[in-house]
Image (tube, rainbow, N blue to C red):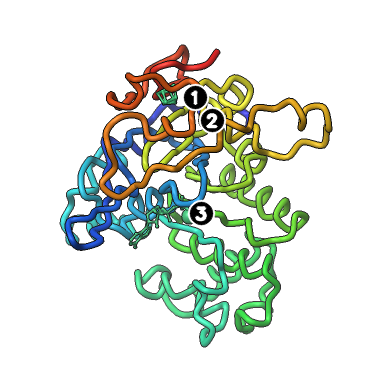
Amino acid sequence: MAENRMTENEILLDVQNLKKYFDLGHGKSLHAVDDISFQIKRGETLGLVGESGCGKTTVGRTLVQLYEADAGKIIFRGRDIATMSRGQRKKEQLTKRMQMIFQDPYASLNPYFTVGEIIGEGLEIHKIGADKKERLDMVYELLDRVGLHKEHANRFPHEFSGGQRQRVGIARSLALNPEFIVCDEATSALDVSVQAQIINMLIDLRENMKLTYLVVAHDLSVVRYISDRVAVMYLGQLVEIGAVNEVYDHPMHPYTIGLLEAVPVADPDYEKNRKISMMKGEIFSPVNPRPGCRFASRCPYATEECSSITPQLRCMGGDHYTACHHPVG
Ligand SMILES: Nc1ncnc2c1ncn2[C@@H]1O[C@H](COP(=O)(O)OP(=O)(O)OP(=O)(O)O)[C@@H](O)[C@H]1O
Ligand code: SF4
Ligand SMILES: [Mg+2]
């Protein structure tokens, strides 16, 4: 776990009852993010985990305004940005303050631009720096920050390795000096050794540039390594949230237990005895979902109450919260 760096207790991001639905037509609506609330303190890293399709990317995209929220509040630096007009968002400089790093840097880098042009584009648009020369110096400094060289500025994205391309993507996201960055599977397409280099670089940048992260990753060990707290999502809802070591070592929601148990372990006895059977069973649809706990069809502890009453997040002690009628432990 990252050491506790939270000298200030300032809440940078306060997400309240956020909803993002996708209209599928014919009266069908996919509840990708369905009434979730959480906070992130300045300087903190919150990990976000859960199975494919549970809504992690949709949360990230909605926070950085790539999607409009359907309901709820996103209070950033004390102001609700979810309901702001385009003009207000511009005034608040949200595109500068919030950035997102994507899984596939190649897809997000314009192949016809040099790396210097890609990194410098935001500086140009926002008229940062007195002139071209000063902006170029800023590009060189950004390349240096992400472990690349001046000479790389004149090359095109296809001339780089996957890890180097991700470094370019990170340099671009840092160009406008952001406060909050969503890292969405930023290292999952990379080799393990390159992955470790990029993760350590993200940690260094967080310290040096006073960044706050939301880190989305399938790899639970990556999330544990980089995060202060972790939030677990299941079918559009948060089911557990707390300090990362607390949640990993003492999970209370049956889904979190199943998710952590599904990680392969190099111990044949452990492999034989673990209870991954709880992860079997039909997965409810996020389209017009029925009331009650969405994990009920896969949960070995489900009771009648679970199928009719939607569990809400409850404090289980300290800052450990879980949404379950019968938490474990
Ligand atoms: N633009 C869209 N239109 C319709 N449905 C969408 C759209 N984007 C995402 N969805 C659906 O919303 C749900 C959440 O998708 P999302 O991409 O947020 O999941 P995820 O947790 O990031 O998954 P993964 O781990 O595979 O990246 C899924 O059911 C997905 O099919
Ligand atoms: S609320 Fe019920 S069904 Fe849902 S996780 Fe808890 S025990 Fe299982
Ligand atoms: Mg995703």
- At label 1, the amino acid type is His
Label 3: element kind: strand
Q: Earlier in the sequence, mark 2 or mark 3?
A: 3
**Label 1 sits on residue:** 253
Q: x and y percent of residue 281 in the render? A: 50, 38
Q: x and y percent of residue 107 in the render? A: 52, 74
**Label 3 sits on residue:** 184
> What is the number of the mark on residue 196?
none
Of residue 100 and residue 216, the one placed in the foreground of this image is 216
Label 2: element kind: helix
Mark 2 Cα shell of 10 Å, populated few (<14), some (14-19), many (≥20): many
- At label 2, the amino acid type is Thr
The reply to whether the residue tagged 1 has its Cβ within 8 angstroms of ligand 2 is: yes
Q: CA distance from mark 1 to mark 3?
A: 24 Å
Residue found 31% across the figure and 40% down from its top: 77
**Label 2 sits on residue:** 256
Q: x and y percent of residue 259 in the render? A: 58, 35
The reply to whether the residue tagged 3 has its Cβ within 8 angstroms of ligand 3 is: yes
Q: Earlier in the sequence, mark 1 or mark 3?
A: 3
The reply to whether the residue tagged 2 has its Cβ within 8 angstroms of ligand 2 is: no
Callout 1–callout 2 Cβ contact below 8 Å: yes
Q: Is residue 7 visible?
A: no
